[in-house]
Amino acid sequence: MKTAIITGASAGLGQEIVRQLGDVFPEIECYWLIARRADRLESLAISLPGKTTVCLPMDLCDPMSFVRLQEKLAEDRPEVCLLVNNAGCGYLGRIGETDTASQTRMVDLNLRALTAVTNMAVPYMPRGGRILNVSSIASFCPNPRMTVYSASKAYVSAYTVGAAEELRPRGVTATAVCPGPMATEFLEVGNIAGNSRMFEMLPYCDQVRVAAGALRAAREGRTIYTPRLFYKFYRLLAKVTPVKLMVKFTKT
């Protein structure tokens, strides 16, 4: 059965991607929904008539979740036509002042989980398979006070570019979507709302449009997709400006 695996599916951009997935990938019959909150996954599944849904409540920061997912893949042997690595987190705070658990959780979820899930899913992907990784404009330049987060998203973007080339002979593409801030619970959970002048000044992206554009970019096999003209210019600026100068203007 043609299957999509979506991590971080219970809220925000991940939930919106699930809702729009059928518009861009109508051939996909089964959705594997991964997130920590079982109740949200079940509510989302109910809202998807005509699709087979598999709710997999798990915390991808827990290494045992990888064991469970590997066992599920080996048991069902799905045809993974689309993998969406959306699970991620970001916390505002200075190095040495933010609790260590928050700092390392960003590494575990944004890097380790994405790498592990991709590595497990690729053997089940046919030619024409698509990987969609959710990165960020933060990947273009280090962001003081969100140093770990921006570094983790730089990894996501770099990993995507490398994976796209490495998987080309298999006929599998990889796409990284790099949106600006969106009005989701990410801002509250990360202690960003009301505590960052930069976030108050930046133009926000609409998650409905970001989800639609990201899915289309994945379908087309594009490697990097940046929503909004403002952030396309920012990406170009970050490429041509020395990073030590650029970082002085990206403080969150």
Image: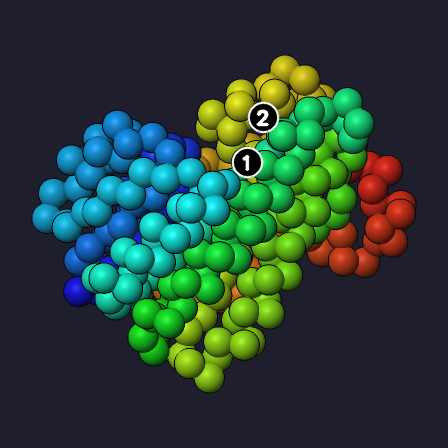
Whether residue 75 is visible here, answered yes or no, is: yes
Q: Residue at x 68, y 17 (%)?
A: 195
Residue on which disc 1 sits: 89
Q: Residue at x 38, y 63 (%)?
A: 121
Q: Amino acid at mark 2?
A: Gly
Q: Mark 2 and mark 1: span between their CA atoms?
A: 7 Å
Q: Is residue 125 above or below residue 18?
A: below
Asked if marks 2 and 1 touch (Cβ < 8 Å), the reply is yes
Q: Quadrant of residue 240?
A: bottom right
Q: Is residue 132 above or below residue 33?
A: below
Q: Amino acid at mark 1?
A: Cys
Split into 4 quadrants, where in the image is the N terminus?
bottom left
Split into 4 quadrants, where in the image is the C terminus?
top right
Classed neighbour count for the residue bearing mark 2: other residues with Cα under 10 Å, few (<14), some (14–19), many (≥20): some
Is residue 115 or residue 235 the one in the foreground?
115
Whether residue 178 is visible here, answered yes or no, is: no
Residue on which disc 2 sits: 190
Q: Does residue 179 appear left or right of residue 82 in this picture?
A: right
Label 1 secondary element: loop
Q: Residue furthest top?
A: 194
Q: Does residue 74 appear left or right of residue 8 in this picture?
A: left
Q: Residue at x 68, y 43 (%)?
A: 150
Please provide percent x and percent y for residue 30: 20, 55
Please provide percent x and percent y for residue 213: 42, 52
Q: Earlier in the sequence, mark 2 or mark 1?
A: 1
Q: Which mark is residue 26?
A: none
Q: Quadrant of residue 218?
A: bottom left
Please provide percent x and percent y for residue 15: 34, 38
Q: Is residue 98 above or below residue 32?
A: above
